[in-house]
Image: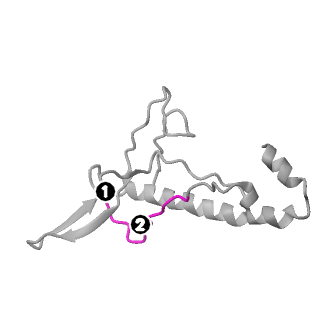
Amino acid sequence: MAITLNLGENSSSSKGKEGNWVKPTVYANIILPATTEEGKSITISLPYGVGLDTMRESEEEGTEAWVDLKKAENAFLKYLLSLSNEVEAGEGTIVPEARVEIRRVKPKNTKPSTENSYFKAISDKVTSLTTIVDEE
């Protein structure tokens, strides 16, 4: 079973040779099974899927535990791509092992460095530290 990534000429991004975005051919759709008032089973999906064949693998560097996690993420991506080889074009399959996680990105810490608890812990011992930070 061959897994083909659709990354164009530049394997580090989803842009092709001329800088145009490469359109994915394999998607992961987030769906919700539902039933109409008439009792008909339907599937409702988000307006857009996640392109899998244009997704880069995670960099596998860092601590041993981090690298192990990144290897597992990359294996999961390859697994999902392998499932696409089992369905005809225009069809899909359900991945019963998968679940959807909704995550909100934390905003950057905008607290001034002098309000940082670590800074306060050492500022009494290093009196010139406040002057150095204020000059930045």
- Residue located at (79% from left, 61% from top): 119
Residue 59 at x, y = what percent?
A: 64, 51
Q: Would you place residue 11 above or below residue 61 in this image?
A: above
Secondary structure mostly seen in magenta is loop
Residue 100 circle label: 2
Query: From mark 1 to mark 2, how far is it between C-alphas?
Result: 12 Å
Q: Is residue 99 in the magenta section?
A: yes
- Residue located at (63% from left, 54% from top): 110
In the rendered image, which quarter contains the N terminus?
Answer: bottom left
Looking at the image, the residue that sits furthest to the left is 38
- Residue located at (40% from left, 43% from top): 24
Q: Is residue 91 left or right of residue 4?
A: left
How crowded is the residue under tag 1: few (<14 C-alpha within 10 Å), some, or many (20+)?
Answer: few
Looking at the image, the residue that sits furthest to the bottom is 39
Residue 107 at x, y = what percent?
A: 56, 56
Residue 37 circle label: none
Residue type at mark 1 is Leu
Figure disc tally: 2
Looking at the image, the residue that sits furthest to the top is 18
Q: What is the span of residues highlighted in magenta in the rendered image?
A: 92-106
* Picture colour scheme: one colour
Residue type at mark 2 is Val
- Residue located at (52% from left, 58% from top): 105
Q: Is residue 118 in the magenta section?
A: no
In the rendered image, which quarter contains the C terminus?
Answer: top right
Q: Nearer the viewer, residue 11 or 50?
A: 50
- Would you name the residue on which mark 1 appears? 46
Q: Would you place residue 26 above or below residue 98 in this image?
A: above
